[in-house]
Amino acid sequence: MRQTVVILDFGGQYTQLIARRVRQEHVYSHVLPYSATADEIAAFQPIGIIFSGGPASVLDADAPSCDPGVFTLGVPVLGICYGMQLTAHLLGGQVVRAAKREYGLSSVRPDRQCILFADCNVVNDCWMSHTWQVAVPPEGFRVIASTDTCPVAAFADEARRIYGFQFHPESVLTEYGKVMLENFLK
């Protein structure tokens, strides 16, 4: 049986790049619109779900969202950029306008005890592109990476296997992005 990762598209410019990076790890990826129901996603029997980035703010009245049932499917979920913010928003965290918008490389300090950062350096250059960021993670989550201007650059609820990156691991400019995606997929 073929392993599949479902990628929910929230309108980010990197959605197809995420799909490509997953396929480069020999895992089939299928892109669905953010409006896909949990049942539609479950029909693919995914080994994981990735939320793409997107240009909106999760605080906008008409912001793209997803079926909250996605978090109860029992498979790992990784939110990237907007996807991380949406995860925080839907699960009770707090998202705010960043004091300083980031666009470019930032030095990210990961908690290498988290499986997603196994085999990464103590400090990694990661590609950031955001105006909004998570200020308070949802209950049950812990901060697993930070930058000088983004205290919650990544978070994890390891018991439920739900993760979020404010940065873009799919970008070749993210120093250990390939390793981080491999760790999520495996």
Image (cartoon, grey):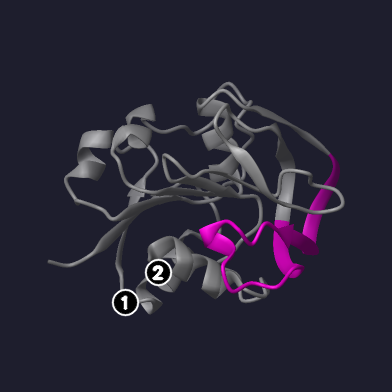
| Residue extending furthest toward the left | 1
Q: Which amino acid is tagged 2?
A: Val
Residue 171 higher or lower than 33, as above or below: below
Residue 154 in view of the camera: yes
Disc 2 on helix, strand or loop? helix
Identify the residue shown where x is 38% and y is 35%: 71
Circles 2 and 1: CB distance less than 8 Å? no
Neighbour class for label 2 at 10 Å: few (<14), some, many (≥20)? many
In the image, taking residue 20 as reference, residue 138 lies left or right, namely right
Instruction: Tell me: 65 left or right of 104.
Output: left
Q: Which residues are magenta?
A: 99-128
Report whether 56 appears left or right of 43. Answer: right
Numbered tag placed on residue 26 in the rendering:
1
Residue 120: in magenta span? yes
Residue 83 located within the stretch drawn in magenta: no
Label 2, on which residue? 22
Image quadrant in which you'd find residue 108: bottom right
Q: Position of residue 52 (x, y in %)?
A: 50, 51
* Other residues around mark 1 within 10 Å, as few (<14) / some (14–19) / many (≥20): few
Q: Position of residue 143 (x, y in %)?
A: 67, 43
Residue 37 horizontal/vertical position (percent): 28, 34
Q: Is residue 17 visible?
A: no
In this view, the residue in front, 134 or 162, is 162
Q: Is 42 above or below relative to 140?
A: below
Taking the spot 34% from the left edge, 53% from the top edge, the residue there is 48
Q: Residue at x 30, y 38 (%)?
A: 36
Image quarter of the C terminus: bottom left
